[in-house]
Amino acid sequence: MIESEYELLAEYAHGDGVSEVDFHDYVDQRGKSLFENCVNHDNEDPMEVVLSQIDMALDLLGFAKHIGDADWEAELKKRLGILNSRRNKLKAKRTSEGLC
């Protein structure tokens, strides 16, 4: 349901050089059925979400190595780098807010 909206939003963000975009500002959410299959919601801890995504990416990386898919491995390593950067930003933010 959101694929076309996401692709358009991602294209605009990439063209503008924006690193983060608030999905809610750009996508019509009438009925909220859009989020029925979401893996996380606003009330979840962002650090827990990122750590879960890192775990999943590591699992996939192991599988990609097992089947010998070098292209997928490279994509996953790039994704892990981005997730690690996001984790470090969250950790720094928590430290500055005195939450750690």
Image (cartoon, rainbow, N blue to C red):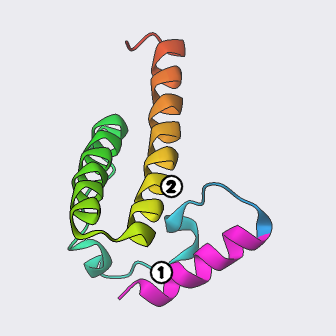
Where is residue 13 drawn, in percent x and y? 68, 68
Q: Where is residue 71 in the image (x, y as percent from the top left)?
A: 45, 71
Report x, y in % for residue 89: 53, 31
Residue 62 place in picture, x, y as percent: 24, 55
Badge number at residue 28? 1
- Image quadrant in which you'd find residue 83: top left
Q: Which of the pair 26/55 is nearer the observer?
A: 55
Tell me what residue is drawn at x 60 percent, y 84 percent.
8
Q: Quadrant of the C terminus?
A: top left
Labelled disc at residue 47:
none
Within-10-Å neighbours for mark 2: few <14, some 14–19, many 20+: few
Magenta-span inclusion, residue 68 = no
Which residue is the site of mark 2?
78
Instruction: Give the magenta-colored segment's residue range.
Output: 1-15
In the rendered structure, which disc, 1 or 2, sits on the residue that comes first in sequence?
A: 1
Q: Which residue is drawn at 39% across and 62% down?
A: 73
